[in-house]
DNA sequence: TAATGCACCTGTGGGC
DNA sequence: TGCCCACAGGTGCATT
């Protein structure tokens, strides 16, 4: 599942490959993944030149000439692939953009949760709902002090769902939320209001360190995530909690446990991450 | 108002 | 071997 590091790597891959390319045609096999009619989508995209690529939270934003931009969310199983025209087309390829260099940009998504939205560049933040997102954790403006303040505003609720709340902080999903909490030695069900300053600091440090390292190793490929070239990421081998149910904790050798929070799995070490609801 | 839980969807894997 | 069912998860929306 692409979270911030994976989407960042995809954006960097796109920046290397498609900027300056002209979209000569587009085919839409599954109209429900776009936010307009296929006809209108095609009109807006065809013959546009890809000007720039950026990321906000887990959304890829592609700025086109002609006044329109695309916003792509891969959700759980989405992939954005840059491949030669003649390369075999994978099952569940919903959109194909033909480029003027013999390559294609393909949107693939077996579970069909992802989307490719189009809107006027001037209004793209609104079309994609970017205003509702919390701070970008890797930006300079995301300071320790800001994080402390944001946490202190939320007295109720449990820490893991809060870390995954995109309105609180942008880009963390199930995998990195588990890894951050393991790093900070905090139980995923810990009430936010009971966290000490020191613990909040640890979470902050964990977010920065883990995301940067995951980007360095080109993301985690536990489900279907691949770079635009089709290569998987390499961060899985550094995962210390996520997906390790039944295995030994790398710190204390206690068996890693899995619990359900809402309908999501949370992996943690019951010895390092003791549930305490006091400071 | 904020927290919580469910539906969306399909591939995968376990049980029979 | 093949069928059935539970499960995986990001987000929007409904419910509490």
Image: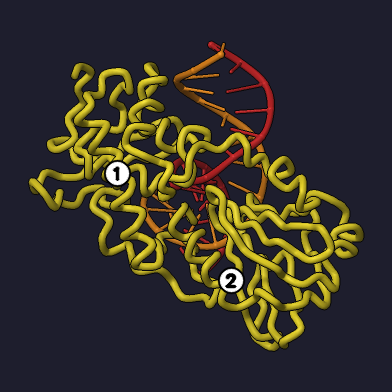
Chain colours: A yellow, B orange, C red
Residue annotated with mark 1: A180
Q: Is residue A84 left or right of residue A161?
A: right
Above/below status of A244 relative to A12 = above
Residue A248 spot, x, y in % from top left: 14, 51
Q: Residue at x 72, y 87 (%)?
A: A102
Q: Position of residue A30 (x, y in %)?
A: 77, 59
Quadrant where the C terminus of chain A lies?
Answer: top left
Picture quarter containing residue A23? Answer: bottom right
Q: Is residue A177 above or below residue A149?
A: below
- Of the pair A137 and A24, the residue shown nearer to us: A137
Q: Nearer the viewer, residue A271 or A84?
A: A84
**Quadrant of the image occupied by residue C7:** top left
Q: Residue A152's x, y, as percent? A: 36, 21
Left or right: B11 with respect to A276? right
Residue at horizontal 47 percent and vertical 45 percent from the top? A136
The label shown at residue A14 is: 2
A148 and B2: which one is in front? Answer: A148
CB-based contact (under 8 Å), mark 1 and mark 2: no
Chain letter for mark 2: A
Left or right of residue A211: residue A166? right
Residue A22 position within the rendered picture, expressed as x and y whole percent measured from the top left = 77, 77
Packing grade of label 1 (10 A; few <14, some 14-19, many >=20) is many
Name the residue at 79% across, 66% down: A65
Q: CA distance from mark 1 to mark 2?
A: 28 Å
Mark 1 chain: A
């Amino acid at each position: 599942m692409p979270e911030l590091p994976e989407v960042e790597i995809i954006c960097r891959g796109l920046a290397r490959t498609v900027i300056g390319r002209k979209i000569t045609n587009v085919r839409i096999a599954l109209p429900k993944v776009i936010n307009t009619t296929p006809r209108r989508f095609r009109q807006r995209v065809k013959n546009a030149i890809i000007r720039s690529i950026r990321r906000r939270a887990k959304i890829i934003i592609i700025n086109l000439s002609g006044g329109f931009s695309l916003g792509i969310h891969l959700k759980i199983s989405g992939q954005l692939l840059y491949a030669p025209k003649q390369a075999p087309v994978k099952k569940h390829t919903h959109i194909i953009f033909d480029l003027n260099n013999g390559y294609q940009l393909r949107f693939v998504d077996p579970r069909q949760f992802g989307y490719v939205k189009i809107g006027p560049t001037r209004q793209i933040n609104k079309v994609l709902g970017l205003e509702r997102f919390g701070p970008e954790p890797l930006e300079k403006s995301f300071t320790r002090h800001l994080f402390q303040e944001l946490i202190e505003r939320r007295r109720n609720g449990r820490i893991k769902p809060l870390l995954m709340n995109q309105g609180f902080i942008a880009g963390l999903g199930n995998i990195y939320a588990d890894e951050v909490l393991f790093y900070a030695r905090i139980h995923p069900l810990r009430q936010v209001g009971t966290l000490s300053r020191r613990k909040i600091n640890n979470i902050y440090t964990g977010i920065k360190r883990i995301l940067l390292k995951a980007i360095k190793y080109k993301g985690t490929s536990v489900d279907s995530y691949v770079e635009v070239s089709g290569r998987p990421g390499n961060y899985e081998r550094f995962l210390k909690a996520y997906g390790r149910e039944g295995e030994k904790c790398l710190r204390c050798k206690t068996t890693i446990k899995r619990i359900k929070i809402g309908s999501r799995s949370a992996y943690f070490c019951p010895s390092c991450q003791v549930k305490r609801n006091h400071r």
